[in-house]
Amino acid sequence: MLSINNATISLGKPITTPALVPVINEPPPTRCINKPFMIGGESYGVTAISFGNPHGAVFVEDIEGVDVPSLGTELGTHALFPRGANIVFVQKLGKGNFAARLWQMGEGEKAFTAEAACVAGTAAIMTQKVLDDKANIIMDGDTYHVTWDRGRDIVSISGSRIECNG
């Protein structure tokens, strides 16, 4: 694991085509945005994105009130994710600012990954919870700046503590 301070890295093109995430999305529109997943009689809107690993972003009203281990497991192993997925819970805090928590397959709740922060930011842009191509994502007490350059279709992240596998 490589840790870089005050860096910007590119995660590349967000994968949103359902067959490539993969996520089952019928009828098959071009993307899975805010699709209802039923868990215990409750509906959760899931936006499916991948930057190499399948993720589902779920917007919630109270990030601290989410039972991340339980709900993350239920959503991440849902039949609509045929290979499973990491789940990012996201709460809008104010203009362009979001808090996020991550449930990661095989690990449970995890404090931060650059990919999860990019999923949160990209989902905020896709669902028009932010009206430009930038979102600030707070994870594990740090703020990360996610930018989606739509012209080149590339998502990047900058922040005080970026960790990469390498």
Image (cartoon, rainbow, N blue to C red):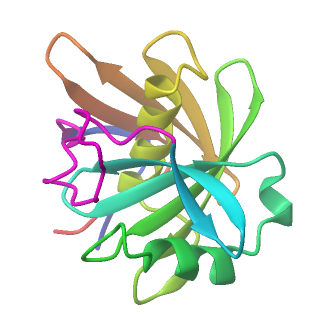
Q: Examine the rendered structure and indicate whether residue 54 appears above or below residue 130.
A: below
Comparing 81 with 146, the one in front is 81
Q: Would you say residue 22 sits in the magenta stretch?
A: yes
Q: Is residue 21 left or right of residue 57?
A: left
What residue do we see at 77% from left, 66% from top?
A: 66
Q: Would you say residue 7 sits in the magenta stretch?
A: no
Residue 32: % across, % down: 35, 42
Residue reaching furthest bottom? 106
Q: Is residue 58 left or right of residue 95?
A: left
Comparing 127 with 131, the one in front is 127
What residue do we see at 68% from left, 29% from top?
A: 97
Residue 99: % across, % down: 69, 46
Quadrant hosting residue 122? top left
Quadrant hosting residue 28? top left
| Residues in magenta, as a range | 12-34
Q: Please indicate, yes or no, whether residue 28 appears anywhere in the rendered image.
A: yes
Residue 140: % across, % down: 65, 60
Q: Examine the rendered structure and indicate whether residue 14 appears above or below residue 83.
A: above
What residue do we see at 47% from left, 24% from top?
A: 125
- What secondary structure characterizes most of the magenta part? loop
What residue do we see at 41% from left, 46% from top?
A: 119
Residue 128: % across, % down: 54, 19
Q: Please indicate, yes or no, whether residue 109 appears anywhere in the rendered image.
A: no
Quadrant hosting residue 1? bottom left
Quadrant including the C terminus: bottom left
